[in-house]
Amino acid sequence: MAVLPPLLPSGWGRPGKDHRRHRAFPAVPPPCRLLVLPLLAAVLAGCVPADQRPSGRVYPLPRHQPNDGLAVVSRPGGEGLHIWIETDTARPGVCRPRWLPDAARLRGGNGPQPTSFGLAPRQEFFQVLERGTVRLALRRQMEALCRQRAPGSTFLWEPPPRTAAEHRPPVLPLLEEPDLLSDPRAIRRAEKQLLGLPLTPDDREEPEETGHGGW
């Protein structure tokens, strides 16, 4: 009985043909790859247990008054950042953000009683700002806080820094010597007045002004 040779694809064995081009399955066109990658990422994420994935919750978490804090659950187990929201009213008639990248560490962010403590690394602050939902929540709360603290001022939105290089710490005014030191006679005079004790001539004497031009 004659044995028939196996069937080969057309062109197999011919000189000058690259047999490696023959595949069992057709190649995925480039436009379809853009759809396959997100689907694959979603499937892989679904394999991680829910308690090991961050919930991504973003909600107001006041510190001292409404709208002065924002909670962002960015880590598994309900952990994340408690961002402190502050305003800058140094310019008359203008209320704008004062960005503080040193956020507190959030605990229990998925539960009914979230808490915060200590400081989280600044890099986490810049990472959560990549999310549009976080930036939108910050803008809404910042504007509401300005309305509370400076009702007659104009709200001026300034986007938060996205990197450490973009962060510009506020420049605070330098303190002068009278702001740092108190005259002992003024303190003693205030204590006696508070206690109802009589003042002596020394207590009534005003401190002498000292010049700063030299000795």
Image (cartoon, helix red, strand yellow):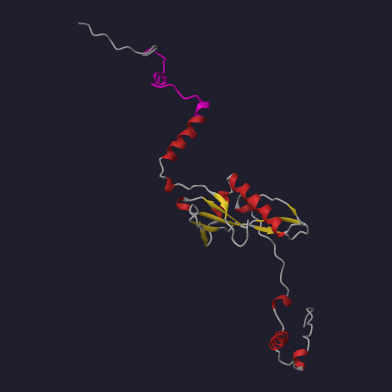
**Residue 125, percent from left and from top:** 57, 53
| Residue occupying the far left of the picture | 1
Residue in the picture at 40% in, 40% down: 47
**Residue 126, percent from left and from top:** 58, 51
**Residue 85, percent from left and from top:** 63, 57
Q: Is residue 31 magenta?
A: yes
Viewer-side residue, 83 vs 23: 83
Residue in the picture at 44% in, 40% down: 45
Viewer-side residue, 50 vs 65: 65
The quadrant of the picture occupied by the N terminus is top left
Which secondary structure type mostly characterizes the magenta part of the structure?
A: loop
The quadrant of the picture occupied by the C terminus is bottom right
Query: Looking at the picture, does residue 3 appear above or below residue 178?
Result: above
**Residue 117, percent from left and from top:** 52, 62
Residue 205, located in which quarter of the rendered image? bottom right
Residue 81, located in which quarter of the rendered image? bottom right
| Residue occupying the far top of the picture | 1
Q: Is residue 165 left or right of residue 34?
A: right
- Which residues lie in the magenta part? 13-33
Query: Looking at the picture, does residue 44 appear above or below residue 188?
Result: above
Q: Is residue 201 magenta?
A: no
